[in-house]
Amino acid sequence: MDFSVDKENKAISVKREFAAALPLVWEAYTKSEILDQWWAPKPWRARTKAMDFREGGYWLYAMVGPGGEEHWARADYLKIDPHKSFSARDGFADEEGNLNRQMPQSRWDVAFSSAAVGTLVTNRITFGDLQHLEQTLAMGFKEGFVAALENLDGWLSRR
């Protein structure tokens, strides 16, 4: 896995290869019933309230902690090229999907390609300002996303 931060361009890049066929990895990123099984770092879990994976659609979900606390987020899908890539605007929200403009927001560009042992997923996450990137990292994004990707690796290995 390659995790890099580019402060000059206000971006995070995460590349991870999975030992699974591209169609299965694509489904893991685009179907809520699968996302709920791996998206959150343990002992947290993800719970989808609504998902409409299409351009103009969105994913509204909560990260649920071991004590039942909930942190809501919303991803609005901008462009989808099936089995190749998708992009979305992502941000913290309330349970109804209203964005919290006081918290960081970002754009995710996620690309899928065949690799030597399976599928390479490249996540490029860009921010409107450096402060939002740094705030996201300070909240433990790297550790949490790396743990979630390990969850995905485990889920894929059981298929």
Image (cartoon, rainbow, N blue to C red):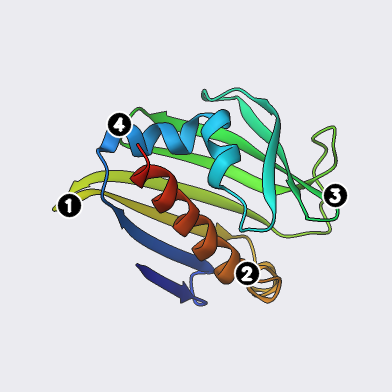
| Cα gap from disc 3 to disc 4, whole angstroms | 33 Å
User: Which is more foreground, mark 2 or mark 3?
Assistant: 3
Please name the residue shown 51% across and 58% down the image: 125
User: Secondary structure under badge 2?
Assistant: helix
Q: Given the image, on which type of amino acid does mark 4 rest?
A: Pro
Which label's residue is closer to the chain start, 3 or 4? Answer: 4
| Cα gap from disc 4 to disc 2, whole angstroms | 31 Å
Q: Residues within 10 Å of mark 1 (few under 14, many from 20)?
A: few
Which quadrant of the view contains residue 74?
Answer: top right
Above or below: residue 109 compared with residue 47: below
The reply to whether the C-beta atoms of the residues labelled 4 and 2 are less than 8 Å apart is no
Which label's residue is closer to the chain start, 4 or 2? Answer: 4
Q: Given the image, on which type of amino acid does mark 3 rest?
A: Gly
Q: Is residue 119 left or right of residue 80?
A: left
User: Which is more foreground, mark 3 or mark 1?
Assistant: 3
Which quadrant of the view contains residue 58?
Answer: top right
Q: Quadrant of the C terminus?
A: top left
Query: Mark 1 highlights which residue?
Result: 117
Query: Mark 3 highlights which residue?
Result: 68
Residue 95 position, x and y percent, is 85, 37
User: What numbered label is drawn on residue 133?
Assistant: 2
